Image: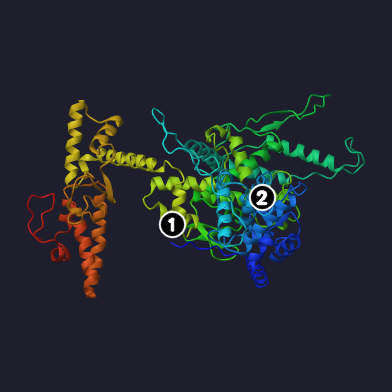
Amino acid sequence: MVRKVAQLPAPQVANRQRVLLSLDIREIQSMERGDLLAFQAALGFGATWGVWEAPKAWCAPGQDAQRWIRCRTLDAPAGDRIWTEVLRLCLLLALTRSVRVYCLPASICHLGRVALAISNLLATKPGPATRWWSRATTEELRAPSAAHRQVCAILATFYRRGLLPDEPAPPCQDDGALERDRHEVEMAEVTPDSSKQWQPLPDAFTAACGQRALWLVQHLGASLLDCLDACLDTTLSPPSAWNARLQTAGHRTPKSEAALLLEMRATLIRGWVWRTPEGHVVTDLPFPLHFKRRVAAPQGKHPAQPQTEPFAWPPHTWGDLWNLIQTLQSSHAWLLFLASGPRQSTVLSYTIQCLAPSPHGFRLDGTLFKTPMTRGGRPRDWPLPPLLVRAVQQQIRLASLVKRLARPYDPGSLGEHLWVLTRGRLQGVGLGGAIVNMNPPLQRLVEVLGLEHLLAPDNPTLHTHRFRKTLARILALALTSAQMVLMDCFGHEDPDMTFGYMVSDKSIVADALRVQRELVILLAREAIQQADALGGPMGKVVCDAKHRFLRLKNRGVLTPEDEFELADQLTLGGRDWVYVMEGVICTLSAFDAGPCGAHKGVRRDPLHCQAGCPHQLILAHHKNHANDMIAYLLPQLQRAEDEEAESLVAQLVAQLNNHLYRWSDVFQRWATHPLVVRYGKRGSSPWWAEEVQPV
């Protein structure tokens, strides 16, 4: 399958075409500083020696930190040579196809930073002045990470195309003896280092963190935002003509106003009644929160460091409330990342207008930036369950309140972004500005909840991309059509890309088989509980097995442990039974042949399950399903017969006979219907009757 290429920004395409008209790209390998800077400026990546900068408009949201390459070794003896080689490579990446696709601006910066690290290493190696990339072997350069391996592959590709004078040297060959004495020597095991890869989150961490984030959003979020709203409505009364705390009569200093406002807000917070949306008073938290609370120093003492104490419910100060607001925003983000697995750039594209009403609730509007063919991303929407609708609605209110705090008289001037900065000033953005990186708030959420110990020791960082791997793993274990669901969820256009997410956890095959066996045993346990009402030829077998087991245990009813034991015996450890359709189970062993696989070269084919098969087990609730289907099919069959649609009549007759002969009482109810008399299986012998008269 051909992988589609992401469309470059329009200005970058125009600049690239103009440069290619006046340049033979094979000349780049011999250019010096002046020419290199001229073409760098013509492409739109700046004109400063030692700096490669991609315009902000060319990159997706959240990629501000990935728009730069800075050479910090220009003052070193080989500094100019290092940057010259890196700049040549960046120009080639911007003007040509790399290993597979044209490079997006952020990708050029990422590969350029890796090439800069490689060049700093090569500067310490001896070699002729005419050679640079061949000063080290591919084994040395490829080892650190997957990005290093990608850069080495690009260098080799450009060298074979005549765009670079050399490439990393091949590894040294072993010229030693071919025969070695390996008597009693254990085979060396090579374990790949996966610590740098964003692997799925551990199940224990996902469960614990998810429960806490869910509780904060469902039970405490609304009350926290009500309290914040009330604090923002708090205003100071005009100063009196004389006040001992005022330096000037009738006038307050900004410092005294801030202190008085904090006191009023703290008084409001201490008297606030914290309630759930259902009206229950929250007297304590079901889990601890690990952030510090500032306390006043003893009178007359001025410690160098502010004194703190562990947080305890309920909140007492403005600082306590603000810490809880930050935690609530991170909880909203946590649930959204896990529920739909978006990329960080997509989450940052959400605005306060992102909830779109639909006939069945709400949908979430966002933008896909990586895989679509359109420039600037492709607008998309996703379905939202009611829980996430509440989370997004709370986040919209939270963002509006924080912007109102930052700019009381003009909060709308800060923008329509959904995720707001709540801590100081970061990368030139102040309070209420747009967040450009969701990883720090999520990592802080882990620390506040005290769940660092549940993350893998070799991969302790909560990166946003790990949520995509986690969702892929969960669906791969739970759904048979997981790949199609994930392609729609992630916005992929290539099934191979989605499959890579599904198998990123190397143990997923073993986990999938384990989950499948457990689901089969649970299915068998459900059948055992309703054994007296089962249908199909195997219904009587399961019922007899249950009564024999009761006699063996000398009991009147089965305990849950007995049900699991019997289910394990009937399914051979969860390996045999297969769910064919709603309420229908195939109990044929995978090693035996049945009617469904006859003359097909296979033993068992659940897709061609036939009514009346001796290995079929039908659950009790299927009786209503079969009856409803017959009631639906008969009017459709009559309409098709009236319209003389022969092919449709044949299709509906096949469906009718498929449901008509599964239950004896369902058959008896419809046996006298004219269409059943006309199209029923004449002379057939259903499993539930030794001999049935033809209809």
Q: Residue at x 82, y 42 (%)?
A: 257
Circle nearer the N terminus (2, 1): 2
* Horizontal and vertical percent position of residue 477: 40, 45
Question: Of residues 33 and 617, which is closer to you in this image?
Answer: 33
Judge from the rendering whether residue 369 lies leftward or rightward of residue 536; answer left or right: right
Furthest residue in direction bottom, as rendered: 643
Q: Quadrant of residue 684?
A: bottom left
Q: Residue at x 18, y 50 (%)?
A: 594
Q: Residue at x 14, y 66 (%)?
A: 678
Q: Amino acid at mark 1?
A: Pro
Which residue is denoted by mark 2 in the rendering? 116
Q: Amino acid at mark 2?
A: Leu
The label shown at residue 565 is none
Residue 378 visible at all: yes
Residue 62 visible at all: no
Which residue is denoted by mark 1 in the rendering? 495
* Horizontal and vertical percent position of residue 94: 63, 62
Looking at the image, is mark 2 or mark 1 nearer the viewer?
2
**Disc 2 versus disc 1: distance between alpha carbons?**
34 Å
* Horizontal and vertical percent position of residue 609: 22, 54
Residue count near mark 2 (Cα–Cα under 10 Å), binned few <14, some 14–19, many ≥20: many
User: Up-down: is 235 above or below 288?
Assistant: below
